[in-house]
Image (cartoon, rainbow, N blue to C red):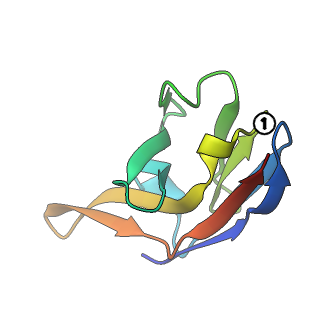
Amino acid sequence: VQLQASGGGLVQAGGSARLSCTVSRSINLITILGWYRQAPGKQRDMVALINTGGGTTYADSAKGRFSIAKDNAKNTVTLQMSDLKPEDQAVYYCMARSYDFGEWKTYWGPGTQVTVSS
């Protein structure tokens, strides 16, 4: 499974950004899709997850501001971010987790930078 993220870039504080991730195979077969982020010197943290049934999970920092969605027909997962804050600045990674060849596997995209100017 290959993932390719797009979007991000430079955004002013209080502004919005939309990240999109294209998955190389049908996301109907992928159990969990999500977005993580990693700021310099910090660990990679979960931002939002969505499962095959459309159920979502958000980090506390993302609740009420971010929205994750998927398009099964396009094999994409998006992260709509609003009211961005300087602390949201990070490299954002698309993630897919599925049960392949008898084991759980996690796949990562290369990441896309989100810079929030104050």
Residue 26 or residue 16, whichever sits in front = 16
- The residue at 73%/41% (across/down) is 81
Query: Which amino acid does the dot numbered 1 rest on?
Result: Ser
Using residue 75 as the reference point, say whether residue 82 is left or right of it. Answer: right
Residue 97 or residue 44, whichever sits in front = 44
Callout 1 crowding tier (Cα within 10 Å): few <14, some 14–19, many ≥20 = some
Using residue 82 as the reference point, say whether residue 92 is left or right of it. Answer: left
Residue 32 percent across, percent down from the top left: 41, 47
Residue 46 or residue 69, whichever sits in front = 46
- The residue at 59%/24% (across/down) is 63
Residue 53 appearing in the image: yes
Q: Residue furthest left?
A: 102
Mark 1, residue position: 82
Q: Which quadrant holds the C terminus? A: top right
Residue 42 or residue 101, whichever sits in front = 42
- The residue at 49%/72% (across/down) is 109
Q: Which quadrant holds the N terminus? A: bottom left
Q: Quadrant of residue 115?
A: bottom right
Residue 21 against residue 17 in the figure, above or below: below
Residue 53 percent across, percent down from the top left: 49, 34
- Give the number of callouts: 1
Residue 6 against residue 53 in the figure, above or below: below
Residue 51 appearing in the image: no
- The residue at 57%/57% (across/down) is 90
Residue 60 against residue 16 in the figure, above or below: above
Residue 29 against residue 25 in the figure, above or below: above
Residue 69 percent across, percent down from the top left: 66, 42
Residue 112 percent across, percent down from the top left: 62, 69
Q: Secondary structure at mark 1?
A: loop
